[in-house]
């Protein structure tokens, strides 16, 4: 019997998983590896949210199947949150849907709307599911080389649009950006909406890091732009802002047709998030928005510890204005190693795990991504290990 699975064969080996596997082996040998690789938040979920989960879990009726599109109370809380935060009006019945994290939502939205051989524009480097959701759906990815500069993005996007036939159906973007940490202002989204309307292309915006902003920067919502709902949707995840990664709760808001398509396919695939989690998420959005500020301050402090430390030892990096990451160009003497081998080298010699830039796309080569998922003491320990490995100091 043949074991040929064409859809799976289109997916390359997960580069980010290689470093994680080596790290796991090292830890089994008893080595103290400082994990700055996978973006897996280490901060505990705030106690009031956990307490609400416990309370809701004690109610027997909450153990039944839930709703794949999310309970009404949570969808209303999502829309109220958008109104308070961005002054965006949304209909909880037609313009909002709860997802099992942003990753599930994006992948199923693409599966529902992109047909075989249809093309989707995706920045490169990017968070892997942005590109591979298209591959899984049978579509074609057209990469937009992205350095983190707005002018470069639009120039490359226009070029990709002109060189692609038939014209792309969708554009997937993510600001603040993972992995480059690049940020944009509302004028960027105004230009993007104008471009999308002119070219009749859907926009999917991933706002997963919209709350993790520093130094006075505030990330705008794509939906703040008039007419944005005509051509696009925005995803948000509670994993980072509310420190709820394992809870798997996010949402998608915006264009009614895209929301309907996502709701339709989810109705066949799942029964939604466990209802006590949805109830706790509702309370988090309605009552505990201020807790996000504490989380943000923790990441800012860790950012400073890592960037100040690396710059002090001679590895020049920029402080990001947002996200829980630091995107760093590999020091010149080690650039020829490539990002995967350099990441393995850091893990072996410095005992620090980072993510190779190539894991986010070919144009991420030459960089590594640090995730701020260890406390400041451990981050400073990592800097000392890196100094000994790279600068022989």
Image (tube, helix red, strand yellow):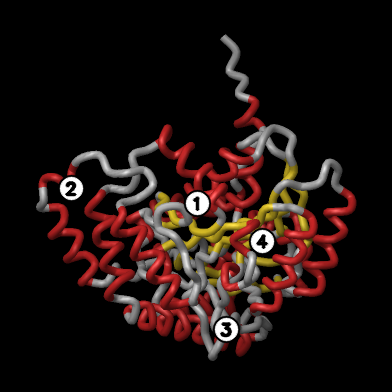
**First reached walking from the N terminus: tag 4 or tag 3:** 3
Q: Residue at point 50% right, 45% down?
A: 260
Q: Name the residue under label 3.
A: 307
Residue pushed farthest top?
Answer: 1
Between marks 3 and 2 in the image, the one whose residue lies nearer the viewer: 2
Between marks 4 and 1 in the image, the one whose residue lies nearer the viewer: 1
Q: Mark 4 points at which residue?
A: 357
Q: Residue at point 61% right, 41% down?
A: 113
- Along the line of sight, which residue is nearer the eye, 258 or 35? 258
**First reached walking from the N terminus: tag 2 or tag 4:** 2
Label 4 sits on a secondary structure element that is: helix
Callouts 3 and 1 close, C-beta under 8 Å = no
**Residue 259 % position (x, y):** 51, 49
Callouts 4 and 3 close, C-beta under 8 Å = no
Report how far apart the C-alphas of labels 3 and 1 lie in the structure.
29 Å
Between marks 3 and 1 in the image, the one whose residue lies nearer the viewer: 1
**Residue 365 % position (x, y):** 73, 60
**First reached walking from the N terminus: tag 4 or tag 1:** 1
Kindly identify which numbered label has been placed on residue 103: 1
Report how far apart the C-alphas of labels 2 and 4 lie in the structure.
43 Å
**Residue 151 % position (x, y):** 81, 74
Asked if residue 380 shows in the view, the reply is no
Horizontal relation, residue 189 to residue 65: left or right? right
**First reached walking from the N terminus: tag 2 or tag 1:** 2
Report how far apart the C-alphas of labels 2 and 1 lie in the structure.
25 Å
On-image quarter of the N terminus: top right
């Amino acid at each position: 019997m043949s074991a040929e699975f064409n859809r799976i064969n289109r997916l390359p080996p997960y580069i980010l998983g290689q470093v994680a596997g080596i790290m796991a082996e090292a830890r089994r040998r008893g080595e103290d590896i400082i994990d700055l690789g996978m973006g897996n938040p280490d901060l505990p979920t705030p106690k009031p949210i956990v307490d609400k989960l416990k309370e809701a879990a004690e109610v027997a009726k909450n153990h039944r199947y839930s709703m794949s599109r999310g309970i009404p109370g949570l969808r209303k809380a999502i829309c109220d949150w958008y109104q308070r935060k961005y002054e965006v009006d949304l209909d909880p019945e037609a313009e909002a849907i709860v997802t099992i994290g942003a990753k599930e939502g994006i992948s199923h939205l693409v599966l529902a709307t992109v047909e075989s051989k249809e093309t989707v524009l995706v920045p490169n480097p990017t968070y892997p599911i942005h590109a591979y959701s298209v591959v899984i759906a049978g579509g074609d990815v057209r990469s937009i080389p992205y350095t983190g500069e707005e002018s470069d993005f639009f120039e490359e996007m226009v070029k990709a649009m002109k060189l692609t036939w038939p014209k792309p159906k969708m554009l997937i973007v993510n600001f603040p950006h993972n992995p480059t940490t690049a940020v944009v202002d509302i004028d960027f989204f105004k230009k993007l909406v104008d471009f999308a309307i002119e070219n009749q292309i859907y926009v999917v915006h991933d706002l997963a890091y919209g709350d993790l902003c520093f130094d006075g920067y505030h990330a705008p919502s794509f939906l703040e732009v008039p007419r944005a709902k005509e051509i696009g949707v925005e995803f948000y995840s509670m994993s980072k802002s509310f420190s709820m990664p394992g809870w798997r709760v996010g949402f998608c808001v915006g264009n009614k047709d895209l929301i309907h398509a996502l709701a339709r396919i989810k109705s066949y695939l799942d029964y939604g998030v466990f209802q006590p989690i949805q109830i706790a998420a509702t309370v988090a959005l309605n009552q505990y928005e201020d807790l996000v500020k504490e989380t943000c301050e923790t990441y800012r402090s860790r950012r400073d510890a890592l960037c100040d430390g690396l710059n002090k030892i001679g590895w020049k990096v920029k402080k990001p204005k947002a996200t829980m990451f630091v995107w760093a160009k590999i020091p010149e003497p080690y650039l020829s190693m490539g990002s995967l081998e350099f990441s393995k080298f850091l893990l072996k010699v410095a005992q620090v795990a980072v993510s190779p830039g190539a894991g986010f796309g070919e144009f991420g080569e030459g960089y590594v991504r640090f995730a701020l998922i260890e406390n400041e003491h451990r981050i400073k320990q990592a800097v000392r290990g890196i100094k000994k490995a790279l600068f022989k100091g």
